[in-house]
Amino acid sequence: AKAAKEAAAKEAKASKVAAEQAKAKEAASAKAAKEKAAVKATEEKAKAKAAEEKAKEAAAKKASAEQAKAEQAKAEEAKASKAAKEKVAAKAAEEKAAAKTAADAAAKEAAAKNAAAIQAKNEEVAATSAKAAEEKAVAAAAKKVATEKAAAEQAEKAKASIQASQEAAAKKAEAAKASAEAAKKQAAEAAEVRRLQALETEKTKQAALQTEQKSAAEQKAEARAAKEAAFEAELKRGKEAAAAKAAEQKLAAEEADVAAEARAVAAKAAVKKSVEQSKLSKSKFASQEALDSMAAKAQNAEELMAKAAAAQSKLAEQQAAAKVAAPAAPKVAAPAPKPAPAPKPPPPPPVVKPVPAPAPAPAPAPVPPPPPAPAPVAPPPAPVVEAPAPAPPPPPAPAPVAPPPAPPAPAPVAAPKKADKGADKAAEKAAEKAAKAAAFEEKAAAAAKGAAAEKAAAAADKAKAAAAAEEKAAVAAQGAA
């Protein structure tokens, strides 16, 4: 029994040793497997890191290529825009030169026609002067009645013209009000667009915060799209502002045109009435005082004609400045289509002695106003003062037109009559004064041309500065985006 017990104890001890050895072997195997797994995990981690770095490098290269491509596209777009602007400027210069050539040709043709008409009228007066001298008393009474009737008709016409100009001014005011409302509406729309853009920008920022895990290529594409949208919105706002400014300038030019036409009508009426008064005064009173009075009235009428011509010239300058300042806006209306009233025909052969017989006297010389004449002439033309009332007064400088606005002689009268020597001397004196006035007006016209050239150069400089500022603003907006 003892031997069996010892044998059992030995066997138990041997099995315990075997179990411990198996346990140690299993622990060693588990440790080796764990170390092998750790080595494998380290290798996989290194491979993943290398793959990630490679992907980042590829994405960076792709983003750089896209950025270079976008910059090249921007450069090409800027080059095309510059070429288009230069083309528009060249076209505008060609149109301006063509319009000036046409206006000069029309002025020359009108001057030739006026000279021919004056010559024909002088010949007619020469043929009928003898008969008019025989029927002097009857003709004087008839002319007085006709003058009064013509003055009344001219007053009615001037009144109708003033009423028409007032109605046109009211219509222009309504149009200006509508234009202002439209501009206000456009401003409100632009403000709404800016507000929506701000909201969109905020949304974009929030989306950018939420999408930080997106790839670099997607983020760059979104940023480029947002930048293009902002640039297009800014360009649209600039075009709308330019269109509104051009519309305001066009409205102001049309109002000035209406006012100039009203003044021209009034000046024509004054000249016609002054001519009729001159005929009546020459028929009834062939004296120095009567001639001086007629010259003074003719000077007033001539000044009104010069003011009307100056208003037309100023309107043409405003329209030219509007074309240069806003090339992207709609074209402004062409200058006033009636350049004929301002230029006068070239002076006829000088110093023909006037006679008391009635003469047409289309443009008496602008001599200084003499002392009041005792001759009973017709009252001064009232519509001349009332006609320019609806419009602002024109500048005092004479219009820069090709022919001088006044001939050197008071009136080319044909078939002189040996009558009053005092009238002949007065006519010679008026001719000398007219020559001096013509020289002064030529100097004033040259000065006005110089001032107009300076204004045009200043307007061109302003337009260039505005274009440069617009380009800088566009570049700044792109950089900010």
Image: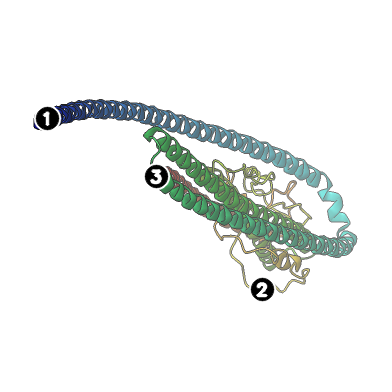
Q: Which residue is mark 1?
A: 17
Query: In the picture shown, does residue 348 fall above or below 314?
Result: above
Q: Amino acid at mark 1?
A: Val
Residue 190: tell me if it is visible: yes
Q: Are marks 1 and 2 in contact (CB under 8 Å)?
A: no
Disc nearest the viewer among 1 and 2 = 1
Q: Position of residue 178 (x, y in %)?
A: 70, 58
Q: Disc 2 and disc 3: Cα gap in Å?
A: 65 Å
The residue closer to the viewer here, 227 or 112, is 227
Q: Which mark is residue 372?
A: 2
Q: Secondary structure at mark 1?
A: helix
Q: Which mark is residue 2?
A: none
Residue 399: tell me if it is visible: no
Q: Which residue is mark 3?
A: 472
Q: Position of residue 267 (x, y in %)?
A: 71, 58
Residue at coordinates 59% horizontally, 33% vertically from top-left?
Answer: 98
Left or right: residue 216 compared with residue 168:
left
The residue closer to the viewer here, 234 or 25, is 25
Left or right: residue 465 compared with residue 391:
left
Disc 2 or 3, which lies upstream in sequence? 2
Q: Secondary structure at mark 2?
A: loop
Count of numbered labels shown in the rendering:
3
